[in-house]
Image (cartoon, rainbow, N blue to C red):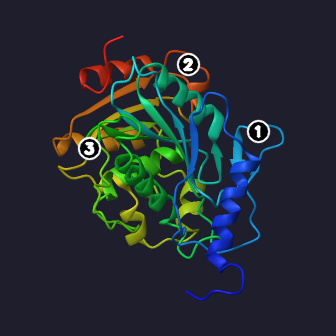
Amino acid sequence: MFYNVLFSVRQKAIAACFLLLLIFPVVATAQEIIPLYPNTIPNSKVSDIKESRDKSNPGIITGTTCPTLECYLPEKEKATGTAVVVCPGGGYSVIVYQGEGVTTAKEFARHGVAAFILKYRLPNDLTMSDKHIGPLQDAQQAIKVVRENASKWDIDPARIGIMGFSAGGHLASTEATHYNKPLIENDQHTSLRPDFQIVVYPVISMQDSLTQQDTRNRLLGNEPSQALKDLFSNEMQVDSQTPAAYITHAADDKVVDVDNSIRYFEALRHHNVPVEMHLFPKGGHGFVFGQKNWMEPLFKWMENSNLMKAQ
């Protein structure tokens, strides 16, 4: 690495991340926001892309280049020892941080589950050397950070899961099926495997007949090879070691075809991976914004899976 008088190029990128933490401070109910990478951010390039909040909806973030984890810890008397990394959606174009991230994390903490919102890097050729692995690097690093700090946060290192919505569901399922191919530094050989996965109206497939086209274009480019489409079609990457899954979707989803969830369910079942799927007949894409009690079946699954105490 070559250094100039003050900062290397990568040091400047890290400094920008810390500046963003000052611009977007911790909200009152979050205990901590931490940079995902303590030093160098892998696979990153310095660019003029700036992170910002949508003016009409500050809960939506664009231009993310500096990944973080925002921690929501339960009260000690309610704590179950279970933790989940939450990946909000947004088509790999934006991050629906408030509606799918903060709201969900608060509900988990209220039920005794530690929640960590992952603000992952959005794939962009201007900010990454290889954009199609950038979000996955961040998901792997998130599991690594939570597992290595489990004692600090009173978490059982064998009960750490990952959850994602829409494109975030693609990211979560990618981490759940690609954990054994590390894309980050891991000197301690920490397990990058989530102990469970939760996917909500997820993009699962990158195949032409099933994928959400805009999401695929942003992650893999406009003309990806068949090999790349297969690699990131997570229904094709399931094996017997894939972590247990909870899947939920609305049958009338016009944005992400429910067959994404159905194909994933079938792949998991055929590999004898424990899986439960809950389909709403109506609700469309983003039904969590209109279904007040959509998490009740999820919490029941977590209780039955010994991930949560009965309420």
In space, the residues marked 3 and 2 are separated at their CA atoms by: 27 Å
Q: Nearer the viewer, mark 3 or mark 2?
A: 3
Q: Nearer the viewer, mark 2 or mark 1?
A: 1
Mark 1 crowdedness (10 Å alpha carbons): few <14, some 14-19, many ≥20? few
In space, the residues marked 2 and 1 are separated at their CA atoms by: 22 Å
Disc 2 residue type (three-letter): Gln
Query: Which residue in the protein does label 1 denote?
Result: 58
**Which of the image's four quarters has the C terminus?**
top left
* 3 and 2 marks in contact (CB < 8 Å): no
Q: Is residue 239 left or right of residue 130?
A: left
Q: Nearer the viewer, residue 85 or 91?
A: 85
Disc 1 residue type (three-letter): Pro
Picture disc at residue 291: 2
Q: Nearer the viewer, residue 70 or 85?
A: 70
Picture disc at residue 243: 3
Disc 3 residue type (three-letter): Pro
Mark 3 crowdedness (10 Å alpha carbons): few <14, some 14-19, many ≥20? many
Q: Secondary structure at mark 2?
A: loop
Label 1 vs 3, first from the N-terminus: 1
In space, the residues marked 1 and 3 are separated at their CA atoms by: 34 Å
Q: Residue at x 54, y 67 (%)?
A: 41
| For residue 91, above or below residue 183 | above
Residue 302 x/y as whole percent: 32, 25
Label 3 vs 2, first from the N-terminus: 3
Residue 126 makes an appearance in the image: no
